[in-house]
């Protein structure tokens, strides 16, 4: 257990559905991240939040909408996704978003878009 | 970011030490070496990190060469649960720091 939980662990959705991924960290960290890991591709950073403020958006399509209501919770709202969005979505947290702050990852949500 | 090079796969007998090498010849002076591992379809797990000195924690030891161009992760007594892909990464120092994984080393611990 890393102190970062994600729900659901598996999600299957159609292209017209709207769903949300949830991440919660119990580590007292200030920074939270969303990553996408596709098969045979490197880990891709999507969003960074520091003290609830979005500090980085790596050119992510608008069909992915993050929300960070507080430092412990992070959501990823999904709508009108494409099959190529099928991937493992990982949440991570760190004390601060600095170069030497260790990021701790959750178990991920395996998303399949039909 | 400094690039890292790792062998694609390694085998290790259960109970023996697993030594995983990593080459990072273009590392700069203030960049840290981090190791994570990822068991199939699970989230990456932090193992250890270091700058110049060798480091040890309850999971592993990290040996960094004096010129910092390479490092070795040592799992002292490998178990079957250590079978995973091990990633050696170098954290750059600009902006908000993403974790960038390369292809890693697939470690297979054999009974």
Image (cartoon, helix red, strand yellow):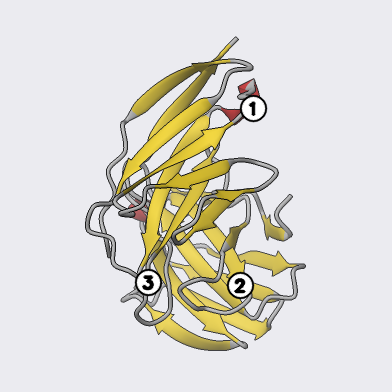
**SS at badge 1:** helix
Instruction: Tell me the quarter of the image containing the C terminus of chain B.
Output: top right
Pointers 2 and 3 in contact (C-beta within 8 Å): no
State whether residue B15 is above or below residue B72.
above
- First of labels 1, 3 by sequence position: 3
> Where, by quadrant of the figure, is residue A44 drawn?
bottom left
Between circles 1 and 2, the one closer to the viewer is 1
Q: CA distance from mark 1 to mark 3?
A: 33 Å
Spot the residue most to the top: B111
Q: Check disc 2: other Cα within 10 Å, few if <14, some if 14-19, many if 20+.
A: some
State whether residue A54 is above or below residue B84.
below
Do tags 1 and 2 sit on the same chain?
no
Residue marked by disc 2: A75
Q: CA distance from mark 1 to mark 2?
A: 31 Å
Q: Is residue A62 left or right of residue B109?
A: left
> Can the viewer see residue B103?
no
């Amino acid at each position: 257990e890393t102190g970062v939980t994600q729900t659901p662990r598996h999600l299957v959705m159609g292209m017209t559905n709207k769903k949300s991924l949830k991440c919660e960290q119990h580590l007292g960290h200030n920074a939270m991240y969303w990553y996408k890991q596709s098969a045979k591709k490197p880990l891709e950073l999507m969003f960074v939040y520091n003290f609830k403020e979005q500090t980085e958006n790596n050119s992510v399509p608008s069909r992915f909408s993050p929300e960070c209501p507080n430092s412990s919770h992070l959501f990823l709202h999904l709508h009108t996704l494409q099959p190529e969005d099928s991937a493992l979505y990982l949440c991570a947290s760190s004390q601060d978003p600095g170069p030497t702050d260790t990021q701790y990852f959750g178990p991920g949500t395996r998303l399949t878009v039909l | 970011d400094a690039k890292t090079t790792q062998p694609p796969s390694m085998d290790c007998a259960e109970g023996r030490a697993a030594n995983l090498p990593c080459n990072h010849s273009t590392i700069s002076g203030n960049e840290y070496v981090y190791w994570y591992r990822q068991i199939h379809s699970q989230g990456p797990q932090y193992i250890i990190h270091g700058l110049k000195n060798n480091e040890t924690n309850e999971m592993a030891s990290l040996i960094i060469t004096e010129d910092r161009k390479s490092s070795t992760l040592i799992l002292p007594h490998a178990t079957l649960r250590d079978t995973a892909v091990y990633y050696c990464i170098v954290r750059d120092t600009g902006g908000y720091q993403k974790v960038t994984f390369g292809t890693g080393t697939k470690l297979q611990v054999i009974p």
